[in-house]
Image (tube, rainbow, N blue to C red):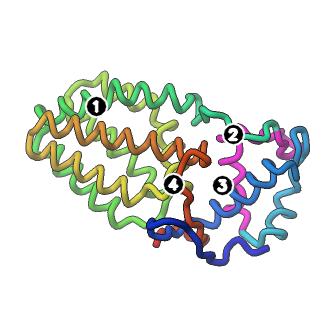
Amino acid sequence: MNLSDSQTGGSGFAAPRRVSAMEAVLTHLREAIGRGDYAVGDKLPSEAELCRRLEVSRPVLREALRALQTMGLTASRTGKGTFVISSGPVADPTFGDYAASDLLEVRRHIEIPVAGYAAQRRSAEDLDHLSHLLERMERETDTTAWVAMDTLFHLAVAQAARNPVFRRVIEEIRDALARQSAFLNELGGRREQSNREHRAIVEALADGSEHDAVEAMSHHLERVETTLTSIVRPAAADSRTTAPTEGGQQA
């Protein structure tokens, strides 16, 4: 079974979306667990065996296994392997030390007003930094590098608000933000959409519009939550086309 090969499909009027080989592997393992091929308490095959069966590289497989753990389907036991702990994903996955719901709640209460303050207080240097960062993100094709810049972007917005407490809060959740960003981009194809949302935020800051900045950040966080929900509870979301490539690029 080669999950690196492209596949086509889809329904309705939505354009097909290319997704990574990691998503194809995750979907395969997730469905196998849901069917009971791997029951609760079962140990998954070794990484070497799964790579052989699915014909994917070890880094791709490890990303998929990490996603399974984030969803609450499996747990890794040092020296023993990966075990199935649930037949269905948890409604509230964990990113680092924080549950997704807690993370989103804090982000709504912090980052939305922060964007408004930043529109009023940003300096020319802040705008130059954000614009340069955004341009790099729009050119970047490597997910890991993009995720690192994503967290820097949100830190830079907090910096532009000219309140060190805001930046300290974003610093505290920085690791969780990076984990969530990687999860959403690998499984939800969020990168291009995030770039557009980030650009709207920067444009609002450049215009000095508190209202537009608040609206742009609100929209960004709403889309984050919607995408997360569609991944964790796919039955409630529209069907997505899977045409995987190991590079993880979208069509």
Residue occupied by mark 4: 188
Near mark 2 (Cα within 10 A), the count class, few <14, some 14-19 or many ≥20, is: many
Dot 1 corresponds to which residue?
112
Mark-to-mark CA distance, 4 and 3: 14 Å
Alpha carbons under labels 2 and 4: distance apart: 16 Å
In the image, residue 150 sits, relative to residue 25, either above or below, namely above
Residue at 21% across / 54% down in the picture? 131
Quarter containing the N terminus: bottom right
Amino acid type, label 4: Gly
| Residue at mark 3 to residue at mark 2: CA–CA distance | 17 Å
Amino acid type at mark 3: Glu
Q: Residue furthest front?
A: 12
Left or right: 243 with respect to 40? left
How far apart, in angstroms, are the residues tagged by discs 4 and 1?
23 Å
Place of residue 216 in the rendered image (x, y in percent of width and height, measured from the top left) = 24, 42
Q: Is residue 122 left or right of residue 54?
A: left
Report helix, strand or loop for mark 3.
helix
Check disc 2 and report the residue beneath it: 89
Q: Are marks 3 and 2 in contact (CB under 8 Å)?
A: no
- Left or right: 193, with 203 as reference point: right
Instruction: Give the left or right position of residue 202, taking residue 120 as reference.
Output: right
Q: Earlier in the sequence, mark 1 or mark 2?
A: 2
Q: What residue range appears in magenta? A: 57-84
Q: Amino acid at mark 2?
A: Pro
Would you say residue 80 sits in the magenta stretch? yes
Q: Secondary structure at mark 4?
A: helix
Q: Residue at x 70, y 42 (%)?
A: 69
Mark 3 or mark 2, earlier in chain: 3
**Residue 21 sits in which quadrant?**
bottom right
Q: Residues within 10 Å of mark 1 (few under 14, many from 20)?
A: many
